Amino acid sequence: MYEYVYDAELVRLALAFGVVVSMLFYDRYGVTTGGIIVPGYLALFVVRPTHILTTLLIGLLIYWMVQKLLRPKWMLWGRKLFETEIVLALLLQSIWLGALLYLAPREQNLTFLFSIGFLLPGILAHDMGRQGARTTILAALGSALVVFGLITLVGAFRDIWGLPLLAANGLSTAPVAPLAFPETWLLVAIIASVVASIALYRWGLFPRALLTDSLRTGGFVTAGYLALFVTRPADLAFVLICSTVTYIIVTQLLMKQAILFGRTKMATMFLTGIVVTWLAELLISFSSLDYVPWIGFNAIVPTIAALLANDAERQGPWRTLAGATVATVFVLAVVTLVYFAYTWIVTGTPELILAR
């Protein structure tokens, strides 16, 4: 995972500001910012511009490959087009990361060339295909600078006035179960998660059974992170509760008061997910519970909660739970098999990842 320059509170604020600024850009100028989550994530790396540059270059390469090579030969549109861009993002990210690790397997002096996120270049490429590369890049960078300015002001005022942190940054004294697999294997998990998400949406769950039609899994990457935390049931329960509360607030309250659909509905899901997970963390930190949820992964929790809630609104909570569960089991099985084969080839002694 990235070591953010900012603390968990400002990271959470950057994501929230990013969604708001993205929607304001869309309403005011009629352009999208490469996805509603893009401005927030880019803003976190303004002080590390090479990360942003690498992300944009990979996004441009995906855009060129899809629009110039793939789309003229195959009929790509809608979700199929987006899936292609996501798969290309993972493929190019894996190749690029592998090249960097090959050039500097021990030193970390090339980490400044890493791209941001696993799928961000694919999301950027998708908007480039709709409104052009130049417009998308300018909108993404402009909105990211606005968000960067906002969190810089918030951080400055907080430091000047000595305001307390509104984030659950405390350390738990209770023993914490290890993750299901090392963070360095997260890319393998994300690849398996994307494959599972596409497969379940295309072919359903069981042939000639109840769930034969499209089955959503709570987003492309959700199962990868759920598999990582499968050895920590409290964390899984935390994100499940937060996604349920997010779903109820948006569908039973907000959608009955306003017309929400498409991009606006997704933005509402993300903002609600951020507020719900943040408040839940605060309530836990103020309670007598010796527990800190999702230690080191605070930034991804609202995204997972929002994606699960959004798919629950589309296809129903139980179908989303089924899809996410099956995808998570698939990811864990894939990572286990790959790890088993890797240890067998490298050390000659095969190991099971959960028994390490």
Image: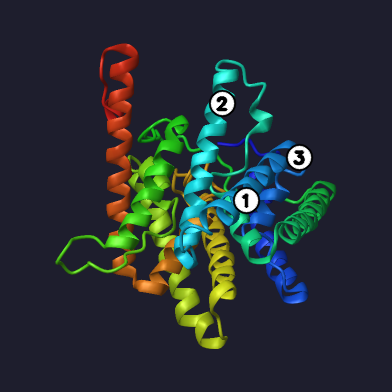
- The residue that label 3 is drawn on is 49
Circle 2 — which element? Answer: helix
* Residue 229 visible in the displayed image: no
Q: CA distance from mark 1 to mark 3?
A: 23 Å
| Pointer 2 or 3: first along the chain | 3
Circle 1 — which element? Answer: helix
Disc 3 marks a residue whose amino acid type is: Pro
Residue 264 spot, x, y in % from top left: 59, 75
Q: CA distance from mark 2 to mark 1?
A: 21 Å
* Residue 253 visible in the displayed image: yes
- The residue that label 2 is drawn on is 99
Camera-nearest label, 2 or 1: 1
Cβ atoms at labels 2 and 3 below 8 Å apart: no
Circle 3 — which element? Answer: helix
Q: Which one is in front, 45 or 240?
A: 45
Which mark, residue 64?
1
